[in-house]
Image (cartoon, grey):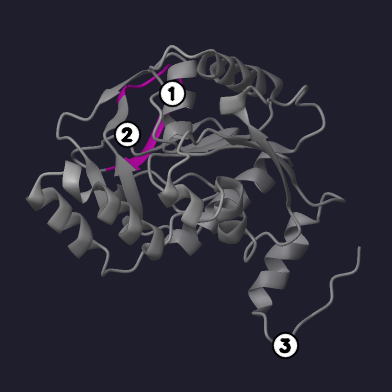
Amino acid sequence: MVMRLSLNAPLNMYIIGLATYANGKFMHIAFLDTNIDRSALAARHASEVDKFRALMDPVAPGWRYEDFRVTEGHFPEALTGVDGVMISGSPASVNDPTPWMARLEAVIREAVAAGVPVFGACLGHQAVAKALGGRVGRNPQGWVLGRVESRIDAPATWMAGAGPRIALHAAHNEQVLALPPGAQVLGGTETTPYGHLAYGAGVFTTQYHPELTRAFMQDLIGEMTASLEPAVARAARDSLTGPVGAAQMAGWIAAFFQQART
């Protein structure tokens, strides 16, 4: 494959892009779409796989994301042909007794046992924890919504340039309450202490949403306002004025998959 340089793109994009090609091919990711939202809000915005593609393309150009709508029973037939698994967020609960959720947990365990790298965000973060023996339940403080700054207490090797904190968008009222065996806490907040987790070098998850833009969050909070306490809705809206570290998180995700496959 030939990479053509563009004067409009930053040099570091090509450096990272060449690194992704170092093993002879670009990454083929099985993207497990867990979103059950079929509302007008969802229709106004990109699909889950396209949200993540937009997040990752600047740091991992050329990666291929094969989209599986797991909520409709569409799962990979096998994991032998993929370089990694990504699991999206969703308004669903990992405690829902649905066939697709049970199968998702089985696929997670299969991937971990086979050494296939797994990344999960929000519900993906929770599903991995539950599948591996942890416990997920309601956040005692209720909704965590808007821009949230979390601590990075023990950065993993793929988290280059990690400072003491990272700001990301959040939208959850459930979270990991008890860790599964082998989980390493990378960081979190007082209300979400298990906000970023790793399981050895092969699994990386976050409770937060690096893929969600400010425009999406504004729309989401607007749709939810009627069902929220006024103070919660106001605080969520006001929080969106600050910057987020989505690009940094994208770099960490790319580095995670690269390290896990070497």
Q: Are marks 1 and 2 in contact (CB under 8 Å)?
A: yes
Q: Which residue is mark 3?
A: 7
Depth check: 91 or 137 in front?
91
Say whether residue 136 is left or right of residue 104: left
Q: Who is closer to the viewer here, 247 or 226?
A: 226
Q: Quadrant of the C terminus?
A: top right
**Residues tagged 3 and 1 counted as in contact (Cβ below 8 A):** no
Q: Looking at the image, which residue is at 80% across and 27% down?
A: 80
Image: 165 above or below 154: below
Residue beneath the point at 29% across and 51% down: 223
Q: Secondary structure at mark 3?
A: loop
Label 1 secondary element: helix
Q: Quadrant of residue 245?
A: bottom left
Q: Label 2 amino acid? A: Tyr
Which amino acid type is shown beneath numbered disc 3? Leu
Residue 61 place in picture, x, y as percent? 71, 62
- Image mark for residue 194: 2
Q: How many marks?
A: 3
Q: Alpha carbon of mark 1 to alpha carbon of mark 2: how far?
A: 10 Å
Lateral position of residue 228 relative to residue 10, left or right: left
Question: For mark 3, does the 10 Å Cα neighbourhood hold few (<14), some (14 to 19), or many (20 or more) residues?
Answer: few
Q: Earlier in the sequence, mark 1 or mark 2?
A: 1
Provide the secondary structure element on which disc 2 rests: loop
Q: Which residues are magenta?
A: 177-188
Say whether disc 3 or disc 1 marks the residue closer to the N-terminus. 3
In the rendered structure, the answer to whether residue 172 lies left or right of residue 255 reads left
Of the two numbered discs 2 and 3 in the rendering, the one whose residue sits closer to the viewer: 3
Q: Which residue is mark 1?
A: 129
